Image: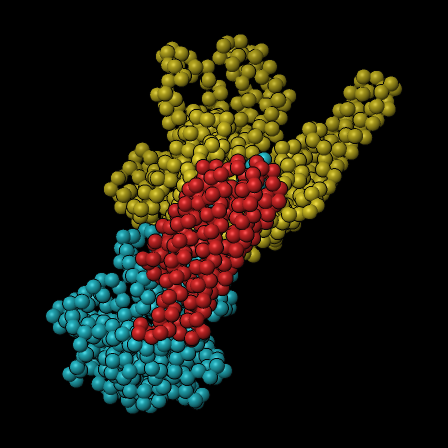
Chain colours: A yellow, B red, C cyan
């Protein structure tokens, strides 16, 4: 990094202010998007100019291949029109299939190139290491070399985003972008490059390229969202990370109680960090008149793991649904397998019929979560994380009628608050087990930790350890108070899903708004973890 | 007359600005005399110089207080006809509190309240002008409206510079007196601008 | 019809909010979330002094602010002085302090205690804590900006411009910090520093190593200075030549042991360098015995004298400054004289306070310009101290 321009730095605030100034005063309205492009290029150059050729390659390859696909499609349409009377139905069908295959191959080229780069940079050493372990186990002396590979900034996010675009062009859901610089802006837009959200081209592009005039209300809401993001990131996430980081450094040395506490704190820290960063991104984008997808909808209020993944990292879930889940679930392989199963004796039973029906979706879900797990990192523990979530979801789909039956037989009302509480608690437990694999340094340590949940509790030892991990009682008090504030805000938002807290705040008096925002900002100034007195925790998802 | 309360109130605001100018000029002269003499502190009590300086200071304080009282009365009267005068009155009360605190404190605390006082003095004038602007809208007097817009910008710049000089004096204490003199100059210009505008508005309201 | 008014009131509301945040941050930075210690009180007190009201300014580290008593110097020798010193000040800090002195005071003489140049390496010059202790307490000025631009890495500069960024976490140290914050506030309101930067500890050193002070008078051997520190010394002397500053150097007495003996030799070397450039250098460390410094009584630790030693050092050095260096003393106004008589009283009270502790208790107590100490001084007489030695 040339200098620190992370989202919670003063340099970033200065950068955004300058960009705002230039953008809103830019005299050529039609070309205002170039200001955003220049800012995004500058931002990327400051953070990672040495590896900028990767993002440029992705942009260029996506741009050219999208145009190619579109040309093939438009040429084929032209030809079909010309030959409309000449060809019979079979000839037309054959031609269409040929074109479809051609387009698919071209698209596949782009996917292989770009996912290949991502896979190589992110997973080569993982596979090499695993291969070496296996070969070593069989007594082979050969070992694959490990390389010193550095991940370019935001590679997971911009690769997924641009590949989503190429698939949309293939599906003719969107037109290929003719201007390579506009595509570069879509790929590298600075508020989202570090940790998303992963945007759909149709949803984001027109907002980026349309000129936006200064709007006070939008600016105000954007700033409020940024303040909220800073509140979560600097007061909660970075403070909690002081303890989590200390535990991660010597993971094996800590007692079960300490590890349990760490996982619980991690749940808070991860949400605050990720959602805080997204709020800052969205707030900045909103100032420029761009609405980005909200990546979080109070995920810890989920009543099932399925629901959790519809509320957590929503853009990744949406991407997986559009580009992995549906293609897999609706592929001929699974549809035929389902049909085959329905034809068997087992398939004619109630359970069999249900399983046959949901087989495609449940297996597709497992595949999706395997990919989600691996996307999080190159380690077996992330594979375990993905498998854990995938298996739970798969089993929940398969066993849904059984659960419904039990609930009906016990005459439990699904609106009963106690039942809802039980569902939320159960879901949280499942989530926490998944988090174990995030925090633990390895799969083995993760399994050991789960064992310690049950057999390794020692309150005295835990208390003695926890008090030496960098946080004093005042820090815990601030963590608690800030978390309560976030919880209350989440409950209010949950009860009023059609509006936002910012819109509700607008209806209050100036004095009320002044006091609330003043307290928020001064809390960040006083209680925020920033400056050289602290080791500012990088955004968790920046490593992606 | 459509707005008799506003007319009376603005007349008093006009008078108050004149008194403010006199007060500022008197204080300006006192400080200038002290600086020209080369001393940064007051001369000895038994000297003629002390008493002449004291006279200027006392007169300045007296006219300042009179201006303040007339301003409050004027705003209190005018607020019956237009809501923005009400806001201006609130800000005047805050100015009063700041001035009281300044009297009993020293050092950085004094500087902070002096700066806050400067800000709210500006706000009093802005809201008074906004009130007159609104009345001018009802009376369809475009000249007063246009002049009002210009005056808001002018007094914001003038009092803004005065505020910056006030803050700068806290960081450069050795130059505090000189900066104070320059600050007073800008304040006087601000009062003159307000006085001119209140004079014009007085006419408009009197003829309505 | 109300559009313009809405624009104006909206702008005002936003501006008021931003102003409130700014003022709050400034207040926090100045008073409540600030690393206030005795260095802060000392340095702030310097800037409260009237322009051109000081005859001598002493610059250096703890060696000088624990050794020289400005109140005693004024009472006995009639010249006004101030200790613009900071704990383990760096060599660049010395230069900035001289520039600030020239900018604000124009004293007849500037005296630099040599400590900053006598380290065996230049590590002290990059010690973040020591740099912050001095520079955080300087008001923003061209000299401070100059130092930051030339010496501070880019990613750390925001913390020097806005110390709140570095120290905002000090809220965790409440209520322990309250008394220093109260001291800061009262100093700010009072408008002058009672002890003119002097600080001491009431304790008599119980050494576990033998003192070599008796050998120092004959010690002529020199040891080279660290190259970086020597270069900075040369830059400093060049600057003083340019500005025609009446500068002298001094080395205060220490409880010299085998471990710190090399510093004496470096001091000798520094004396040679400085003398060759036409500046005076008083190796009073070597003259400790001649001054009458009693190694069994006059130190509170190996690096610093207590009030017993300080009073002797003050008298000795004051005579040198007044008579040998022929200091020109400016007359004071009545108000200034009144102010300085308060300083004299406070200094004498402090001496008696420390003497009481050292004579009647085994306690070790710091004594400085803070509310606790100043409150206790009221129990003691401010009459002149008669030295018994």
Callout count: 0
Residue A198 visible at all = no
Where is residue A380? Give x, y as percent.
Answer: 48, 39
Where is residue A40? Give x, y as percent.
Answer: 62, 47
Q: Please, which residue is most extreme toward the right here?
A: A86
Residue A160 shown left or right of residue C359 in the figure? right
**Quarter of the image where one finds residue A158:** top right
**Closer to the camera, B126 or C48?**
B126
Residue C294 shown left or right of residue A477 in the figure? left
Where is residue A33? Give x, y as percent.
Answer: 67, 43
**Quarter of the image where one finds residue C210:** bottom left
Q: Residue at x 35, y 71 (%)?
A: B50
Q: Which residue is drawn at 34% across and 39% down?
A: A480
Residue C204 shown left or right of residue C66 in the figure? left
Q: Please, is residue A328 above or below residue B3 in the view?
A: above
**Closer to the camera, B150 or B63?**
B63
**Closer to the camera, C196 or A525?**
C196
Q: Which residue is drawn at 42% across and 78% down?
A: C106
Residue A330 shown left or right of residue C103 in the figure? right
Q: Please, is residue C335 above or below residue A299 in the view?
A: below
**Quadrant of the frame with the C terminus of chain A:** top right
């Amino acid at each position: 990094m040339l200098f620190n321009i992370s989202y919670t730095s003063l340099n970033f605030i200065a950068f955004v202010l300058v960009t705002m100034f230039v953008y809103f005063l830019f005299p050529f309205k039609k070309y205002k998007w170039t200001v955003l492009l220049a800012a995004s290029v500058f931002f990327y150059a400051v953070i990672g100019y040495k590896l900028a050729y990767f993002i440029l390659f992705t942009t260029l390859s996506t741009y050219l291949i999208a145009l190619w696909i579109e040309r093939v499609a438009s040429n084929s349409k032209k030809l079909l029109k010309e030959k409309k009377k000449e060809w019979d139905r079979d000839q037309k069908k054959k031609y269409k299939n040929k074109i479809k295959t051609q387009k698919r191959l071209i698209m596949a080229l782009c996917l292989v190139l770009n996912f290949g780069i991502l896979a190589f940079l992110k997973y080569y050493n993982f596979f090499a290491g695993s291969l070496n372990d296996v070969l070593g186990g069989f007594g082979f002396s050969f070992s694959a070399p490990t390389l010193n590979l550095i991940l370019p900034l935001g590679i997971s996010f911009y690769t997924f985003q641009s590949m989503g675009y190429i698939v949309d062009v293939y599906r003719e859901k969107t037109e290929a972008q003719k201007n390579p610089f506009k595509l570069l802006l879509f790929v590298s837009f600075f508020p989202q490059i570090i940790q998303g959200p992963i945007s759909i081209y149709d949803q984001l592009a027109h907002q980026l390229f349309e000129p936006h005039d200064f709007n006070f209300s939008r600016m105000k809401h954007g700033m409020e969202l940024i303040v909220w993001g800073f509140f979560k990131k600097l007061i909660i996430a970075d403070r909690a990370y002081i303890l989590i980081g200390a535990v991660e450094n010597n993971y094996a040395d800590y007692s079960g109680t300490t590890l349990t506490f760490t996982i619980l704190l991690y749940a808070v820290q991860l949400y605050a960090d990720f959602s805080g960063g997204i709020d800052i991104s969205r707030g900045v984008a909103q100032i420029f008149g761009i609405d980005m997808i909200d990546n979080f909808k109070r995920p810890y209020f989920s009543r099932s793991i399925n629901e959790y993944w519809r509320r957590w990292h929503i853009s990744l879930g949406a991407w997986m649904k559009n580009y992995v889940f549906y293609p897999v679930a609706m592929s001929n392989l699974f549809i035929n397998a389902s049909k085959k199963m329905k034809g068997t004796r087992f398939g004619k039973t109630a359970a069999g019929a249900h399983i046959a029906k949901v087989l495609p979706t449940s297996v597709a879900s497992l595949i999706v979560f395997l990919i989600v797990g691996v996307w999080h990192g190159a380690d077996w523990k992330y594979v375990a994380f993905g498998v854990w979530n995938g298996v739970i979801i798969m089993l929940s789909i398969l066993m849904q009628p059984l659960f419904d039956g039990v609930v009906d037989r016990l005459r439990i009302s699904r609106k009963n608050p106690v039942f809802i509480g039980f569902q939320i608690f159960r879901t949280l437990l499942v989530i926490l087990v998944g988090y174990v694999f995030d925090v633990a340094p390895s799969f083995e340590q993760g399994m050991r930790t789960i064992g310690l949940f049950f057999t390794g509790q020692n309150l005295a030892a835990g208390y003695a350890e926890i008090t030496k991990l960098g946080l004093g009682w005042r820090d815990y008090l601030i963590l608690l108070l800030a978390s309560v504030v976030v919880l209350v805000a989440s409950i209010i938002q949950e009860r009023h899903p059609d509006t936002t807290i910012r819109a509700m705040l607008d209806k209050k008096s100036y004095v009320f708004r002044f006091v609330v925002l003043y307290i928020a900002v001064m809390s960040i100034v006083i209680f925020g973890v920033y400056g050289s007195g602290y080791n500012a925790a990088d955004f968790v998802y920046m490593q992606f | 007359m459509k707005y008799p309360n506003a007319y009376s109130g603005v007349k008093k605001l006009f008078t108050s600005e004149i008194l403010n100018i006199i007060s500022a000029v008197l204080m300006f002269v006192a400080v200038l005399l002290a600086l020209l003499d080369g001393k940064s502190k007051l001369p000895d009590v038994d000297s003629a110089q002390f008493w002449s300086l004291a006279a200027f200071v006392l007169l300045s304080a007296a006219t300042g207080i009179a201006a303040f009282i007339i301003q409050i009365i004027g705003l209190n009267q005018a607020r019956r006809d237009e809501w923005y005068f009400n806001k201006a009155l609130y800000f005047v009360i805050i100015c009063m509190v700041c001035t009281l605190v300044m009297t009993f404190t020293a050092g950085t605390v004094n500087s902070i309240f002096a700066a806050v006082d400067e800000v709210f003095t500006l706000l009093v004038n802005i809201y008074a002008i906004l009130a007159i602007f609104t009345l001018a809208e009802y009376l369809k007097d475009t000249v007063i409206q246009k002049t009002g817009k210009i005056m808001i910008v002018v007094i914001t710049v003038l009092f803004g510079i005065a505020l910056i000089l006030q803050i700068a004096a806290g960081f450069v204490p050795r130059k505090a007196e000189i900066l104070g003199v320059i600050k007073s100059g800008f304040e006087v210009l601000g009062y003159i601008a307000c006085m001119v505008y209140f004079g014009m508005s007085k006419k408009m309201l009197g003829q309505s | 019809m109300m559009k313009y008014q809405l624009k104006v009131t909206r702008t005002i509301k936003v501006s008021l909010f931003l102003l409130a945040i700014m003022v709050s941050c400034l207040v926090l930075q100045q008073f409540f979330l600030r690393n206030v210690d005795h260095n802060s009180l000392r340095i702030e007190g310097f800037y409260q002094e009237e322009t051109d009201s000081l005859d001598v300014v002493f610059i250096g580290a703890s060696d000088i602010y624990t050794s020289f008593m400005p109140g005693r110097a004024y009472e006995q020798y009639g010249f006004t002085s101030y200790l613009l010193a900071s704990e383990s000040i760096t060599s660049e800090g010395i230069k900035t302090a001289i520039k600030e002195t020239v900018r604000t005071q124009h004293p007849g003489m500037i005296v630099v205690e040599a400590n900053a140049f006598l380290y065996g390496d230049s590590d002290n010059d990059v010690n973040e804590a020591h740099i912050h202790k001095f520079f955080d307490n300087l008001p923003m000025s061209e000299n401070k900006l100059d130092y930051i631009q030339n010496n501070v890495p880019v990613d750390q500069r925001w913390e020097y411009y806005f110390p709140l960024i570095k120290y905002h976490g000090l809220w965790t140290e409440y209520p322990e910090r309250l008394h220093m914050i109260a001291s800061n506030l009262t100093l700010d309101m009072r408008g002058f520093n009672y002890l003119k930067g002097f600080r001491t500890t009431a304790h008599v050193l119980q050494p576990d190593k033998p003192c070599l002070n008796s050998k120092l008078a004959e010690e002529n051997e020199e040891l080279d200075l660290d190259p970086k520190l020597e270069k900075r010394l040369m830059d400093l002397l060049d600057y003083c030549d340019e500005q025609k500053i009446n500068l002298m150097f001094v080395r205060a007495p220490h409880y010299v042991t085998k471990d710190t003996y090399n510093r004496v030799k470096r001091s000798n070397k520094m004396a040679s360098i400085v003398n060759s450039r036409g500046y005076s250098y008083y190796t009073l460390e070597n003259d400790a015995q001649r001054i009458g410094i009693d190694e069994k009584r006059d130190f509170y630790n190996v690096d610093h004298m207590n009030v017993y030693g300080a009073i002797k050092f003050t008298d000795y050095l004051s005579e040198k400054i007044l008579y040998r260096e022929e200091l020109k003393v400016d007359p004071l106004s009545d108000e200034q004289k009144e102010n300085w008589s308060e300083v004299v009283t406070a200094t004498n009270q402090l001496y008696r306070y420390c003497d009481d502790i050292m004579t009647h208790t085994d306690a070790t107590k710091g004594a400085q310009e803070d509310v606790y100490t100043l409150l206790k001084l009221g129990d003691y007489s401010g009459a002149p101290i008669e030295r018994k030695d």
